[in-house]
Image (tube, rainbow, N blue to C red):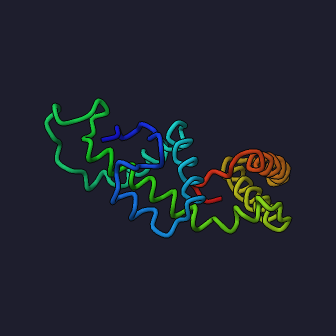
Amino acid sequence: MCAPLEQPRSTLFDCYGEEKSKILAGVSATEQQQIERYFWRNMHSDRAHTMRRRMEQKSAASALSPLPTSQRSPTGRTAAEELAWLMDYLQSIVQIFQEEKERLQALARQDASAWGKLFSQAAFATYRLLIEMGVTRTHAEEIASDIAHAVCRQVGADLFPCDVPF
């Protein structure tokens, strides 16, 4: 059996058979490879760990009763808990990938309207955050525009991460 956080040599979660099949049902082989790249890149960055903290905070109220220490991993979680989290995280990547697939394809094709929409969304979200932080409206507009340009450049340079919606 594969260790939960090791990257398998062939394809994503081959050793988890049925769970993987359910999660990736209807996903083409090419899309599965993209999802696998997103998954492993996110597992080796703060992105997956941030998602894990959020998921655990949401489920803290319904936590299972603790097992004896001898049955837990060094992280304090059982192998079953680790696998459940990995499968939940994979499911979230697949879901968002499916939701964002058309937009990602449009961005990859250099579709001007898709890039314009991404810029507008990034600028608006940044503007709202800056206003909440107490920045003046005029200054917030200028900063938001600069940040939106930087976001678009970064998205264009990367492989379009899919663990959070744009």
The residue positioned farthest toward the front in the image shown: 10
Compared with 50, 131 (above or below) is below
Front position in the image: 90 or 118: 90
Front position in the image: 5 or 121: 5
Compared with 111, 58 (above or below) is above
Q: Quadrant of residue 32?
A: bottom right
Residue located at (16% from left, 47% from top): 65
Q: Position of residue 104 (x, y in %)?
A: 70, 61
How many badges with numbers are in the image? 0
141 on left or right of 75: right
The residue positioned farthest toward the left in the image shown: 68
Q: Looking at the rendering, in which quadrant would you find the N terminus?
A: top left
Q: Position of residue 16 (x, y in %)?
A: 34, 51
Q: Quadrant of residue 23?
A: bottom left
Q: Position of residue 10 (x, y in %)?
A: 47, 44
30 on left or right of 1: right
Compared with 70, 19 (above or below) is below
Q: Looking at the rendering, in which quadrant would you find the C terminus?
A: bottom right
Q: Quadrant of residue 41?
A: top right
Q: Position of residue 133 (x, y in %)?
A: 67, 47
Residue located at (72% from left, 63% from top): 105
Residue located at (28% from left, 47% from top): 81
